[in-house]
Image: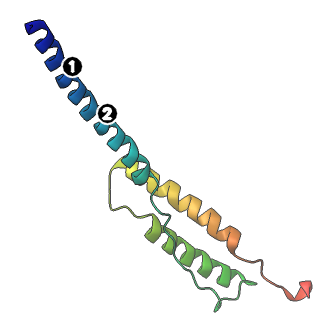
Amino acid sequence: MFTTVNTTLTRAVLGTLGTALCAGVCLVAATAPAAAAEAPRSAKVHYADLNLANKAGRATLDRRLLSAARAVCATGDRSPDAAMDETHCIHQAMTAARAQVPAPVTPAAL
């Protein structure tokens, strides 16, 4: 009689602990991708006022792009790993931004 009660009690306790452990693991697994999949940040950089056909205009655009990339990539964390991640983010942002800038129309192309 005690064996049956002990076995039933043991099963109930182990079942409850197993369910709680599984729920904890599922909760962690479900929230990890959400934290990692942060929405991409962006910034608008205006350049309609620049003459991209000359060096000064392109240099001004490059400064604006760099400023925007730094603002978008800033984390506020000053650890070495975060600084390296920020630098990588800025490099990627600059590459993507430069690819979106149309080639200047020069008089020779007309």
Q: Residue 80: x, y in percent? A: 37, 48
Q: Is residue 7 left or right of residue 47?
A: left
> Where 57 sits versus 33, above or below?
below
Q: Looking at the image, which residue sits at the far left?
A: 2
* Pointer 2 local density, CA inside 10 Å: few below 14, some 14–19, many at least 20: few
Tell me which amino acid carries mark 2: Cys
Quadrant occupied by the C terminus = bottom right
Where is residue 4? Give x, y as percent.
Answer: 15, 10
The amino acid at mark 1 is Arg
For mark 1, what is the residue? 11
Classify residue 5 by image quadrant: top left
Q: Is residue 21 above or below residue 109?
A: above
Q: Which residue, given by chain and number where applicable, does mark 2 sit on?
A: 22
Q: Is mark 1 on a helix, strand or loop?
A: helix
What residue is shown at x 37% (from left), y 61% (from top)? Answer: 75
> x, y (%) of residue 44?
55, 80
Residue placed at 32% from the left, 55% from the top? 78
Residue drawn at (84%, 85%), measured in percent from left and top?
106
Asked which secondary structure carries label 2, the reply is helix
